[in-house]
């Protein structure tokens, strides 16, 4: 949910690690924030929750603890949207953030605010999480992904 709000891209096997001591999932490489992945030479199309990842969630798949955690996280983000916006404002106006690259299109700073639309939306948290889960579990997404993403790993 946080990755969705931030527009975090480049979530492939090499950027999502598992701490073997604690079992924690650790995200690394935050270079593709604010939908920056859509400006790559081969743009990221859609986020994808593969069948392999769903299988790792156990017998309930996305309908168990995963959905509950998503709903609780989204509700927490909604309840604290003012604090979240103040943090994002600091990133939006940070002169050290790389907003432009010679090889890529310029990323408007206003794109940071797109994810907050979900936080501010009047759609119920449960319905919003349902829409997001439907989007990321759509098998058609796999056909649009960059082959180097290696979804079969």
Image: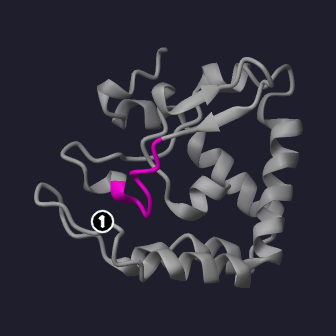
Residue 86 lies in what quarter of the image?
bottom right
Question: What stretch of residues is rendered in magenta?
Answer: 29-36
Asked if residue 51 is positioned above or below residue 88 in the image, the reply reads above
Residue 10: % across, % down: 42, 42
Q: Main secondary structure of the magenta part?
A: loop
Indicate whether residue 30 is drawn in magenta: yes
Residue 47: % across, % down: 50, 44
One can see residue 55 in this view: yes
Q: Which secondary structure lies at badge 1?
A: loop
The answer to whether residue 95 is left or right of residue 70 is left
Residue 97: % across, % down: 36, 68
Q: Which colour scheme is used?
A: one colour
The answer to whether residue 37 is left or right of residue 40 is right
Q: Nearer the viewer, residue 120 or 86?
A: 86
The N terminus: image quadrant: bottom right
Q: Which of 85 and 72 is in front in this view?
A: 85
**Farthest residue in the top direction?**
153
One can see residue 121 in this view: no
What residue is drawn where x is 88% and y is 47%? 68
Asked if residue 141 is positioned above or below residue 46 in the image, the reply reads above
């Amino acid at each position: 949910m946080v990755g969705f709000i931030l527009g975090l891209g480049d979530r492939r096997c090499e950027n999502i690690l598992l701490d073997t001591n604690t079992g924690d999932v650790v995200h690394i490489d935050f270079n593709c924030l604010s939908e920056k992945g859509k400006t790559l030479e081969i743009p990221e199309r859609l986020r994808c929750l593969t069948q392999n990842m769903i299988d790792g969630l156990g017998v309930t798949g996305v309908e168990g603890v995963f959905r509950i955690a998503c709903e609780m996280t989204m509700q927490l983000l909604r309840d604290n949207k003012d604090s979240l916006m103040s943090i994002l404002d600091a990133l939006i106006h940070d002169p050290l953030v790389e907003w432009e690259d010679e090889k890529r299109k310029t990323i408007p700073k206003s794109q940071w605010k797109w994810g907050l639309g979900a936080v501010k939306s009047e759609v119920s948290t449960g319905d919003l999480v349902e829409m997001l889960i439907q989007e990321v579990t759509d098998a058609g997404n796999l056909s649009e992904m960059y082959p180097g993403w290696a979804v079969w790993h």
